[in-house]
Amino acid sequence: MILTIINFIFWFSIALIFYSYVGYGILVWILVRIKKLWKKPAPLFTDEDSLPHVALVVAAYNEQDFIERKIANSLELDYPEHKLELVFITDGSNDLTPDIIRKYNKIQLLHQPERRGKVAAMNRAIHQVKAPIVVFCDANTLLNKECIRNIVRHYADPKVGGVAGEKRIWQNTADAAAAAGEGLYWKYEGVLKKLDSDLYTTVGAAGELFSVRRELFESAPEGTIIEDFVQSLKLCVNGYVLRYEPDAYAAEAPSASIKEEMKRKVRICAGAFQAMVLLKDLFNVFKYPVVSFQFISHRILRWTLCPIALITLLISNILIVVMAPSPFFTLVLILQGAFYVTGITGWIFASRNIRLKAVYVPFYFLFMNISVFIGFNRFIRNKQTVLWEKAARSQSHA
């Protein structure tokens, strides 16, 4: 009886991990292919005159070293100038960032000395803009020239409440080893987000680049840690969908080291548990059948059960080999051991900023799941503040 239970735990753990990281993507890919057999052409804006007015809101906190590049990038965006409103908000900045922005009369500067976090800054900025479409992006990113056009085209469809852009990581041979895992992760996420969008809705946007209809923007509580994720999914709670646009992207430098990437990842994981509480309505599979399926499959399993399943898989595998050894279970245990040894080796190399391509995947996979446990500990102890110390980024990018 005990061995039967242990076997069940073993196979359930494998099934859960496989579904969350591989199986869900395959399933959605199949469903999207079926859906496309009946898909109608998306509505489009017919000409330049029909394009809506857009406000680009840039949150900048102490970005004096990069802000000139961000301003130049914003001024070069390919969108009718009279329809693009540029708003930079620098609340709390105590360096030269506000002074640099003031030199540009095409940019509206919002600044107050008090630092209350990004959520408060966004909530304040949204009341200052007049355009019906608002695009939020971070000050340490550069947007592709066609970014605004590619985002806006989705708003020809009235059921679209927001559009998420793609996050890209600059990489070159001089970057820290953390860059490889970080970049690979975001490529993988980009594929899943596009599949989610094609099926029904993208499950959350990254703060580096996302947009919303101004009238639908719902201010997040000021203690919200990953406000972009919560605000974008509030659109789904209210009956709209969030599209994903891979041809609108924000590129940023990778974390300067694995320590800096851990700082960022743990913060996100702490915010993920908070987001589950704020977005509890999306667990109602009867009211939101498709969104709940996507939300739980793509996000919740990775934030909750999957890290635990990795532990139960290893423990149950060891117990089975001890109690009823067989070539199959012994082989699986050896493979698990090799995976963790490779991942730990990758972590050691990454902590020394040594690039070793052979260990990217196991290292970053292990890294992400450990971050979940640390983030959960921060969440239950209420130790994660919104006024976080931002992670240092590599200075060796193009």
Image (cartoon, rainbow, N blue to C red):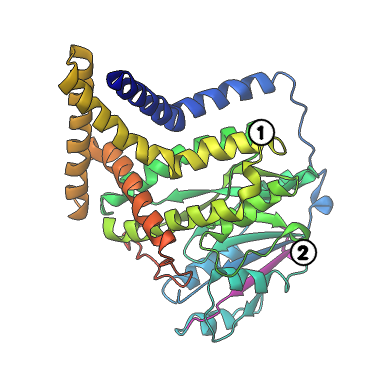
Q: Is residue 102 left or right of residue 393?
A: right
As drawn, the residue found furthest toward the front would be 1
Q: Position of residue 2 (x, y in %)?
A: 29, 22
Report if residue 264 is visible in the image: yes
- The residue located at (36%, 39%) in the rendering is 308
- The residue located at (68%, 23%) in the rendering is 35
Q: Is residue 353 left or right of residue 388?
A: left
Q: Tell me if residue 133 comes above or below residue 93 in the rendering.
A: above
Q: Quadrant of residue 120?
A: bottom right
* Pointers 1 and 2 in contact (C-beta within 8 Å): no
Q: Position of residue 33 (x, y in %)?
A: 62, 21
- The residue located at (61%, 43%) in the rendering is 245
Q: Tell me if residue 197 comes above or below residue 386 in the rendering.
A: above
Label 2 secondary element = loop
Q: Amino acid at mark 1?
A: Val
Q: Amino acid at mark 2?
A: Ala
Instruction: Quickly name the residue at label 1.
Output: 290
**Which range of residues does the magenta coloring cover?**
79-93
In which quadrant of the rendered image does the N terminus lie? Answer: top left
Instruction: Quickly name the residue at label 2.
Output: 131
What is the crowding at mark 1: few (fewer than 14 residues within 10 Å), some, or many (at least 20)? some
Report if residue 144 is visible in the image: no
Q: Position of residue 49 (x, y in %)?
A: 84, 53
